[in-house]
Amino acid sequence: MKRSRVRITRGRGNVFLDVGFPPHEAAVMLLRCELAEALRKWMTREGLNQAQAAKRLGVVQPRISEIACNKVDKLPLGYLVGLCAKAGLTVAVKLAA
């Protein structure tokens, strides 16, 4: 059996760029995913289920379900930042030139 060569390409630090999204969309999508991940970690750390998290954040449970399943493509960044603030999470943006 002949072995084939596997070519590995180093990623650019944003999986959305790597799969072909335009830079402006990739940046927003990555930020959404990072904020959702922070909220999921907060829920785990606090021992909250989706209903409890929704009540603490003042939103409906289906919205928390979207975050828990990383279906955040339609959620505005400002909304996710606001939820992080309600959860007591510090959000910071670091720009690189």
Image (cartoon, rainbow, N blue to C red):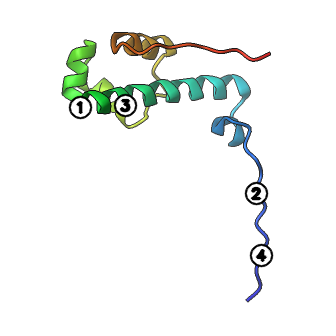
Alpha-carbon span between mark 1 and mark 3: 10 Å
Q: Residues within 10 Å of mark 1 (few under 14, many from 20)?
A: few
Q: Can you identify the residue that label 1 sits on?
A: 47
Mark 4 / mark 3, whichever is N-terminal: 4
Alpha-carbon span between mark 2 and mark 4: 13 Å
Amino acid bearing label 3: Arg
Residue at left 20%, top 17%?
A: 55
Image coordinates for residue 7, horizontal then vertical, percent: 78, 61
Amino acid bearing label 2: Ile
Closer to us: 94 or 61: 94
Q: Secondary structure at mark 2?
A: loop
Q: Secondary structure at mark 1?
A: loop
Q: Secondary structure at mark 4?
A: loop
Q: Residues within 10 Å of mark 3 (few under 14, many from 20)?
A: many
Q: Residues within 10 Å of mark 2 (few under 14, many from 20)?
A: few
> Are the residues flagged by discs 1 and 4 in contact, CB closer than 8 Å?
no
Mark 3 / mark 2, whichever is N-terminal: 2
Q: Secondary structure at mark 3?
A: helix
Q: Can you identify the residue that label 4 sits on?
A: 4
Could you say which disc has been placed on residue 8 in the image? 2
Query: Looking at the image, is mark 2 or mark 1 nearer the viewer?
Result: 1
Alpha-carbon span between mark 3 and mark 2: 31 Å
Residue at left 56%, top 13%?
A: 92
Image coordinates for residue 27, horizontal then vertical, percent: 65, 24
Figure quadrant of the C terminus: top right
> Are the residues flagged by discs 2 and 1 in contact, CB closer than 8 Å?
no
